[in-house]
Amino acid sequence: MLSKKAKYAIKALLALADRDPDEPMRIADLARREQIPPKFLELILLGLRNQGILRSRKGKGGGYLLARDPKDIYLGQIVRMFDGPLAPVPCASQTAYVPCADCRSEAVCGVRLAMKEVRDATAKILDGTSLDSLRGQVARASLLDQSR
Amino acid sequence: MLSKKAKYAIKALLALADRDPDEPMRIADLARREQIPPKFLELILLGLRNQGILRSRKGKGGGYLLARDPKDIYLGQIVRMFDGPLAPVPCASQTAYVPCADCRSEAVCGVRLAMKEVRDATAKILDGTSLDSLRGQVARASLLDQSR
DNA sequence: ATTTACTCTATCGACTAACTAGAGTATCTA
DNA sequence: TAGATACTCTAGTTAGTCGATAGAGTAAAT
């Protein structure tokens, strides 16, 4: 399951990617626009900022902005940041490998083999989808939806 | 994350798939062989039985056996049974779709689009992998490992 | 009748997810 | 430079879930 934090983070980043890159957006406005509890969103944006994904400005006219081009922000980074490794089991993780105690032989573990496939497929998608490309997908889906 | 329940279930089923299909295996033996807390495994096997994946025999010489051919038992069913839908968000689920309250328009939701891709990729793998095919993969991996 | 082994319900502690509170700090503007 | 604005950060709280265990009950074999 994707946590609410990760979900809210993606929604907020997507909203920021849709704006003038030099125009900050306030927490309160983002929260209202995306239907996210304001204080909770605050926490999330702070995290993104401390990861270098967002920048912030204090005081009047302040708010949050993307720290990088939307082409260079990938979903994989966001999801890992809030929800940890993509692999369903630690022994199948690429970025955070941990062997499991109850495995007699790792090379012969069916669970690991199957879950490694899942993690690879997931990583391929999330590490291959940038904020910008997702924005494009949404736009195309929106057109299709209108023509229905 | 894959729950321990699902993980233990797969390990136990895989062990059963490796045996004479008419020779029951006791909870205690399975638990020892696969390093699973016996009482916990008991619960898991009971669940699998009530789903029609396992059969059981009571009394001396009793134990658990597969209720179907290992070719007809898919990981997708096991994982869904213990961990719920494969989709990272309910609105991207095929088998347990639930819309999300905070979505203004579902057709235009980036989170949903991306997560639907993840769920489709995961489902393709888990619904395409039977106990039997996984057994085969393990065997091949084991050979590769020995030749190293 | 006794042993064997599965069946089922209840419970428990630890942990985490989702959210909230509130005091603090930097920036702008009048 | 006072005061408003808006982010920063730490510390809760609450409800729910996960992993595991206990123990009484039932069915089958010998």
Image (spheres, coloured by chain):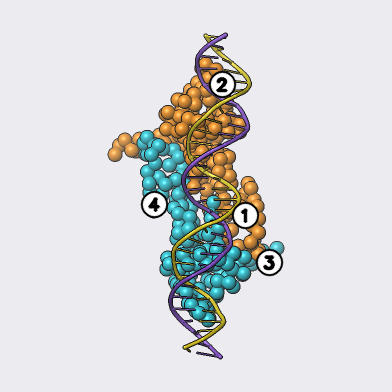
Chain colours: A cyan, B orange, C purple, D yellow
Q: Amino acid at mark 2?
A: Arg
Q: Residues within 10 Å of mark 2 (few under 14, many from 20)?
A: few
Q: Amino acid at mark 3?
A: Gln
Q: Position of residue C5 (x, y in %)?
A: 52, 21
Up-down relation of residue B148 to residue A147 (above or below): above
Return the mark for residue A9.
Answer: none
- Going from N to C along the chain, the mark reached first, 2 or 1, is 2
Q: Are marks 3 and 2 on the same chain?
A: no
Q: What residue does disc 1 label?
A: B91
Quadrant of residue B68 within the rendered picture: top right
Asked which secondary structure carries label 3, the reply is helix
Q: Amino acid at mark 1?
A: Cys
Q: What residue does disc 3 label?
A: A146
Chain identifier of the residue bearing label 2 in the image? B
Q: Is residue A111 visible?
A: yes
Q: What residue does disc 2 label?
A: B57
Q: What residue does disc 4 label?
A: A96
The Cα–Cα distance between marks 1 and 3, rounded to whole angstroms, is: 20 Å
Tell me, yes or no, whether the two marked residues, 3 and 2, touch with CB atoms within 8 Å. Answer: no
Q: Tell me if C26 is positioned left or right of B117 in this view.
A: left
Q: Amino acid at mark 4?
A: Ala
Q: Nearer the viewer, residue A48 or C13?
A: C13
The Cα–Cα distance between marks 4 and 1, rounded to whole angstroms, is: 28 Å
Asked which secondary structure carries label 2, the reply is strand
Tell me the quadrant of the picture where the C terminus of chain B can be found. top left
Asked which secondary structure carries label 4, the reply is loop
Tell me the residue at 34%/38% (across/down): B144
The Cα–Cα distance between marks 3 and 4, rounded to whole angstroms, is: 42 Å
